Image (cartoon, rainbow, N blue to C red):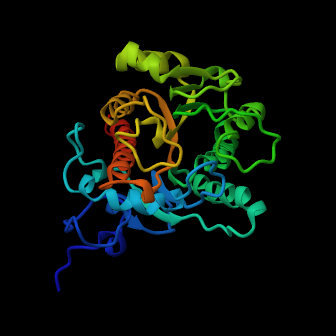
């Protein structure tokens, strides 16, 4: 019997890869091994299929599945533009999805936080797929237990710092809550691509989409590095940071955003930072076309993994 194919369930190790038909097989992220045995893993991928906090179009509960499916071509060849196979040495597991009871909304936050606690206790970094953007709040809470107040690098069309009373399930208020609770270090955090108004940014520096279009990628990267410095930085990438022309499959699209290539160039320039975790959220497949949005999300996540692998190589 041919031993190739379905690496995600047939592999006995977390590194390496094997030939797969792009259009077939078990769809883990980048064909990584599906396992809950994460001892020794460098990075653990998982999904949080929750969209009960959306304010407009639902559907991003299907985001983790879509991002995994869109990652298949990225698993075929050496990583571009890095020129290496990140899984020659980087040990990455696909943990599957966080289990939640959507009919017990009061349990959602604790379910996600405990999920993250378990993974972080292994010593691995987390790469997480939403779900709506609220899921970042319990993820940040878990990371702050390990690292203290975190520098947040947020790619988004919305600031998500609207008023929060400390109890809302709302994907537009959770970073106000995180700032107020000192989960994030506002002074060393940035938001990139913002193009909606909010009266209070809670001390977080904002590089709006118009600012970015005027000043460009290199200046943006300079500002990121200057603001974050050597602090532990968590990247939260809301896919609606991209213009709807490049990411139609999202719940709250806003015109005037970044192009996919611009966002990727920024991500690929951040290898010097102290990267501790990442989430990619708000991919809503019901509104996507030809997997445009899911492919962009998978590539952003793939390139972040390559930055982690690059550090190991050097």
Q: Nearer the viewer, residue 148 or 263?
A: 263
Left or right, residue 36 beside residue 269: right
Q: Is residue 35 above or below residue 75?
A: below
Q: Position of residue 190 (x, y in %)?
A: 56, 25
Res 207 seen here:
yes
Total labels: the figure holds: 0
Res 229 seen here:
no
Q: Position of residue 111 (x, y in %)?
A: 69, 61
Residue for point 78% across, 38% down = 164
Residue for point 41% across, 36% down = 242
Left or right, residue 281 beside residue 141: left
Q: Nearer the viewer, residue 122 or 203?
A: 203
Q: Position of residue 20 (x, y in %)?
A: 21, 67
Q: Quadrant of the N terminus?
A: bottom left
Image quarter for residue 76? bottom left
Q: Quadrant of the C terminus?
A: top left
Q: Position of residue 212 (x, y in %)?
A: 43, 19
Left or right, residue 169 beside residue 206: right
Image quarter for residue 140? top right
Left or right, residue 300 beside residue 18: right
Q: Is residue 108 above or below residue 231?
A: below
Q: Is residue 63 above or below residue 23?
A: above
């Amino acid at each position: 019997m041919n031993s190739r194919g379905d690496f995600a369930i047939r592999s006995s190790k977390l590194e390496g890869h094997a030939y797969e038909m792009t259009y077939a097989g078990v769809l883990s992220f980048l064909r990584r091994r599906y396992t809950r045995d994460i001892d020794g893993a460098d990075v653990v991928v998982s999904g949080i299929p929750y969209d009960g906090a959306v304010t407009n179009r639902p559907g991003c509960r299907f985001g983790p599945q879509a991002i995994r499916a869109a990652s298949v071509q990225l698993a075929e060849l050496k990583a571009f533009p890095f020129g290496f196979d990140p899984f020659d040495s980087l040990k990455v597991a696909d943990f599957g999805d966080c289990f939640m009871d959507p009919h017990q909304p009061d349990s959602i936050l604790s379910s996600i936080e405990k999920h993250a606690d378990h993974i972080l206790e292994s010593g691995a970094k987390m790469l997480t797929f939403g779900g709506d953007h609220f899921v970042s709040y319990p993820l940040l809470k878990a990371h702050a237990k390990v690292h203290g107040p975190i520098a947040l690098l947020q790619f988004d069309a919305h600031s998500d710092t609207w008023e929060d009373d400390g109890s809302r399930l709302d994907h537009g208020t959770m970073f106000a809550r995180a700032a107020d609770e000192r989960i994030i270090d506002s002074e060393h955090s940035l938001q990139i691509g913002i193009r909606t108004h909010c009266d209070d940014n809670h001390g977080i520096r904002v590089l709006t989409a118009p600012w970015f279009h005027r000043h460009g990628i290199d200046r943006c990267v300079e500002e990121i590095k200057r603001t974050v410095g050597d602090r532990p930085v968590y990247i939260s990438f809301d896919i609606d940071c991209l213009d709807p022309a490049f990411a139609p499959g999202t719940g709250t699209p806003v015109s005037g955003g970044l192009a996919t290539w611009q966002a990727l160039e920024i991500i690929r320039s951040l290898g010097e930072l102290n990267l501790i975790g990442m989430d990619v959220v708000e991919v809503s497949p019901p509104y996507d076309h030809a997997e445009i949005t899911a492919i962009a999300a998978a590539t952003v996540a793939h390139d972040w993994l390559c930055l982690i692998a690059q550090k190991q190589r050097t």
